[in-house]
Image (cartoon, helix red, strand yellow):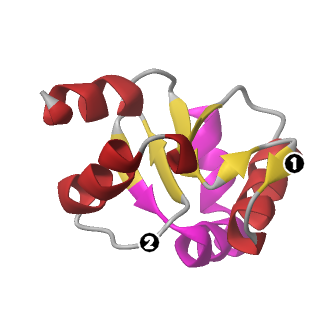
């Protein structure tokens, strides 16, 4: 089912980013910014290019109840989009989250 596919993708990596494009070639500024932030922490992460799969692109919005991309998941839980990730970075919470503290 679509929900099983989504759950499988969300848990594919401890840090999972659903974005437009790929890290080496983001297809929107928000995706580029969130990749830059994640990469600055030097943590392993995986991505899924939502532009390659319309079913996942639409289904994940409903699954997460989050209407926009990028979407960042850690340990299978939705963290949020760029604004939330920026706030967490500024507050120092992102490092704790990524390092598993």
Q: What span is colored magenta in the figure?
A: 79-101
For the residues labelled 1 and 2, the Cα–Cα distance comes to: 23 Å
- Residue 48, percent across and down? 55, 37
- Closer to viewer: mark 1 or mark 2: 2
Is residue 97 visible in the rendered structure shown here? Answer: yes
**Residue at image x 37%, y 52%?**
78
Q: Residue at x 79, y 61 (%)?
A: 32
In front of the other: 3 or 71: 3
Q: Which residue is mark 2?
A: 68
Instruction: Assign a secondary structure to mark 1.
Output: helix
Which of the image's four quarters has the N terminus?
top left
**Quadrant containing the C terminus in the rendered view:** top right
Tag 2 secondary structure: loop
The residue that disc 1 covers is 40
Q: Foreground: 12 or 14?
A: 12
Choose top left, top right, bottom left or bottom right for residue 79.
bottom left
Q: In the image, is residue 82 above or below residue 46?
A: below
Q: Toward which corner of the image does residue 73 lie, by quadrant?
A: top left
Does any portion of residue 101 appear in the rendered image?
Answer: no
Question: Between disc 1 and disc 2, whose residue precedes?
Answer: 1
């Amino acid at each position: 089912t679509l929900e099983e596919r989504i759950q499988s993708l969300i848990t594919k990596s401890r840090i999972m980013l659903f974005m437009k494009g790929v890290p080496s070639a983001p297809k929107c500024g928000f995706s580029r910014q969130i990749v830059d932030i994640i990469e600055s922490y030097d943590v392993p992460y995986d991505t899924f290019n939502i532009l390659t799969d319309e079913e996942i692109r639409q289904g994940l919005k409903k699954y997460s109840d989050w209407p926009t991309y990028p979407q960042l998941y850690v340990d299978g839980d939705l963290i949020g989009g760029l604004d939330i990730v920026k706030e967490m970075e500024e507050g120092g919470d992102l490092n704790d989250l990524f390092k598993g503290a």
